[in-house]
Image (tube, grey):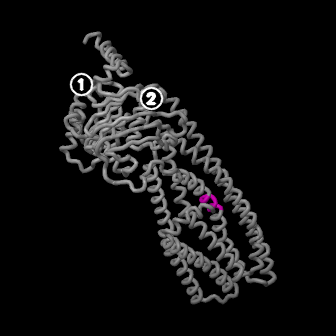
Amino acid sequence: MVVFYYLKWFFIQEKKAYLTGITLLLFVAALQLVPPRVIGIIVDLIQNQTLTGQTLALWMGLLLASGLGMYVLRYYWRIMIFGSAVKLAKQMREKLFTHFTQMSRQFYQNRRTGDLMAHATNDLSAIQQTAGAGVLTLVDSLATGLFVIGAMAILIDWKLTLIALIPMPFMALSTSLYGRMLHKRFKYAQEAFSDLNDKTQESISGIKVIKTFGQEKEDVESFRQLSKSVVDKNIAVARVDSLFDPTITFIVGVSYFLSIYFGAQMVVAEEMTLGELVSFTTYLGLLVWPMLAFGWLFNIVERGRASYERVNILLSHPQEIKNEDGSTSNPPQGDIQLALDSFTYGGTDKATLKTIQFELKRGQTLGIVGKTGAGKTTLLKLLMREEDQYTGFIGMGGKDIKKYDLHALRKSIGYVPQDHFLFSMSVKENIRFAAPDVTEELLEEAARIARVHEDITGFTNGYETVVGERGVSLSGGQKQRISIARALVTNPEVLILDDSLSAVDAKTEEDILTGLKEKRKGKTTIITAHRLSAVEHADLILVLDQGELVESGTHMELMGKSGLYYTMYMRQQLEDLVEKGGER
């Protein structure tokens, strides 16, 4: 029952609804005592031949009234209790989703998408069941059980009641044992479902790769094995779950046997009437539900506890990047200063970046180049505060970027990542994602600067064309340019292109860079690239190698040094020459 303690905060929050629902449940439990007693009285009246039409009508009216009362009360307690449980699921779902949006990239690198989805669906459903059916079952089984036992002892015979309850301790012991087994097995079943969920999501996202390499059969077999694991683990849960009803039914049967055997002797000995024995056995029939419900209760609460613990582990993960006390909400502007001593990713000992310094004036363009793994993207993450565990200083407008509100800082930055993510909606909605109120004119201007306007107008439905999940219906170059347009519509103080021109040809690249230079005067632009032609025009170029700044300067200054930049540039020139057949 620990899960009810876990959910104490919600029960306090919704105390009015739960108290009302529980009160109505208690009235229903009390009204259930009426029919068995009326039946016993009528049996005695018939046996004594004293039943009249008027008396029968009176007792039938009482039965009808109790039935109508239970009908109305059951309707309202369901609204109160089950309605509150739906609110819990909604509240926890929103809390979990909000938590997801606050987590760093490191959080998502260590967790699978399918597993997170399982937490937000299956686990929350089990928790909702606990706050709804679990509360109902607990209160109803206890109230009905206690009221019925009280009626049997007070209205009929306390000695026969004690005899009928002899098997009950065995039921308590067995259901407690089953509950512990169920908790452990259900946890494994939920984990197996998370694995299957993750496999499904991953396979659908990577279906092109699977088909390209002809791995459909292998992927289906992998899915089949995971699906079998889910079935096996749920069958293990069902094996324990299926023990509840037979055990309880057997114990109820023993109670019936004892009640009828000793009750019949008491009727013969005239210690009770036949009608009282009928009422007693009818009351005993009402005890079947509390007993079965008690077993079902263990099922619900153990599932809910396992799921709550899984969700709580996620919610307890701290927000790694957060606003500092006294941070300003004014969007940053001005020069960018960086004096980085070192930066190391969590879980590693070797510094990813070290000893990097530069100052970029507002309105200038910065180029960052280097081999794959040199640290270009990592440096951009630090500028956007996606990582914070560095030593040194990063500032904008003369103020440490940690002194700016996170939302304000990132609102000033238009970021186009290497991995271009488009949502499953229209081209227009994708471009204006960060600026929903942007005018059609500015939206199309951004598309023109990104050199994607003509492509879009060539689509069947133009800007209203739905691109498909993750932009599956577009080419790599089109996705890149739509992502650039999406960043441009916000007119950011700083535009960051993280190797975002790799999928376009040299002519288109030149046109985009020219458009940016013309339209973004007074605004800062940062470009990382493998193709050095993308940064030739930059006011400052940083050359990184194994996380260190080895060279910096303009294109002409770096060429004059005959260092790493010169070597990379000449190699690319030679490669271009070879591709063109040796002709300049």
Mark 1 residue element: helix
Above or below 183: residue 283:
below
Quadrant occupied by the C terminus: top left
Q: Which of 280 and 464 is in front in this view?
A: 464
Q: Mark 1 points at which residue?
A: 507
Residue 298 on the magenta segment: yes
Q: Nearer the viewer, residue 300 or 513?
A: 513
Which region is colored magenta? 295-301
Residue 33 point in image, percent of width and height: 62, 78
Q: Is the magenta stretch mostly helix, strand or loop?
A: helix
Residue 334 point in image, percent of width and height: 28, 44
Q: Which residue is drawn at 44% across and 56% down?
A: 94
In this figure, what is the number of numbered marks? 2
Amino acid marked by disc 2: Gly
Q: Which of 255 and 579 is in front in this view?
A: 579
| Residue sticking out furthest to the top | 582
Q: Which of 318 and 155 is in front in this view?
A: 318
Tell me, yes or no, if residue 113 can be seen here. Answer: no
Q: Is residue 331 left or right of residue 129?
A: left
Residue 249 point in image, percent of width and height: 69, 62
| Residue sticking out furthest to the left | 441
Q: In the rendered structure, which disc, 1 or 2, sits on the residue that comes first in sequence?
A: 2
Residue 418 on the magenta segment: no
Mark 2 residue element: loop
Q: Which residue is drawn at 61% across and 50% down?
A: 187
Tell me, yes or no, if residue 330 can be seen here. Answer: yes
Q: How crowded is mark 1: few (under 14 residues within 10 Å), some or many (20 or more)?
A: few
Numbered tag placed on residue 373 in the rendering: 2
Numbered tag placed on residue 558 in the rendering: none
Q: Is residue 316 left or right of residue 241?
A: left
